[in-house]
Amino acid sequence: MKRTILYLAGIFLIIITAKLNSQTIKIETTQISYEDQLRPCMTNDLDPTPKEVKKAWSKFLDKNYDIDVSGIGWFSDEDILIAKDVTIGDISEKRINLYSRILEKGNGSEIKVFASFGYDFFIGEDNYPKEFKSLNELFYKFLFSYLSEYYSDMLEETSDKIDDNNKEKVSLLKSIEKNKDKIEDAKEDIAELNSEKPETNE
């Protein structure tokens, strides 16, 4: 049983390492239906859960651009997170609205990111190619930093579990060896008692 657990943990460790080392982030350009119209956006599928992705996205924007995102917090967990009327110098000097829709997909999540100038001027490849490319770069920066940290944490956690299992295995082996010695001592005591005179056998 212990050997099976260690074997499975080892396989899991190899899979995570392969994901981390050969990780390719492919951002696809597509559309999203928002306010009854199709808007240009970019998308990517991730392994973490929607809530984990939402927290990471909110933390990333706050840390790197001092932007607060509405839709995720103590009392809210919306599908679409919004940062209204914000300035992101990496994208444009003009103020924009930044949107992200994060939903469950399979065993992980799907995130779609899109943005607009004002109420209805949504940034796309055709109308704002420079800004759209910059938004893509920002999105990639988030995915790379977040997923690298996510898989590194998983790798460390799995390594710790394997170490704990190995320590437990060593402890069990020591206990077995110790009990073997006790058994041998008991056998010697029994043999000694059996060799004594009949009147002292009891």
Image (cartoon, rainbow, N blue to C red):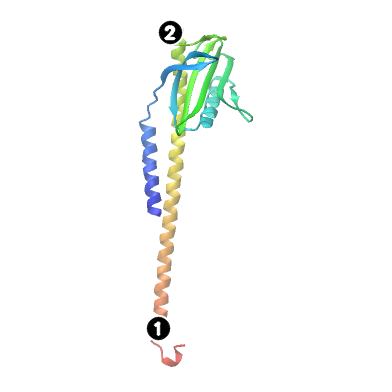
Task: Indicate the secondary structure of the residue bearing disc 2.
Answer: loop
Which three-letter amino acid code belongs to the residue tagged 1?
Glu
Query: What residue is pinned by disc 1?
Result: 192
- Nearer to the camera, 51 or 191: 51
Q: For the residues carrying marks 1 and 2, which lies nearer the camera in this image? A: 2
Q: How many marks?
A: 2
The residue sitting at 43% across, 51% down in the picture is 165
- Nearer to the camera, 127 or 133: 127
One can see residue 98 in this view: yes
The numbered dot on residue 30 is: none
> Can you give x and y, in whole percent of width and height, for residue 90 in the image?
49, 14
The residue sitting at 43% across, 71% down in the picture is 182
- Nearer to the camera, 73 or 62: 73
**Marks 1 & 2, CB-CB < 8 Å contact:** no
Query: What residue is pinned by disc 2?
Result: 126
> Can you give x and y, in whole percent of width and height, for residue 1 in the image?
40, 55
> Can you give x and y, in whole percent of width and height, for residue 149 in the image?
46, 32
The residue sitting at 39% across, 33% down in the picture is 20
Report the side of 90 relative to 25 (left or right).
right
As displayed, is residue 15 above or below residue 187? above
Report the side of 140 relative to 83 (left or right).
left
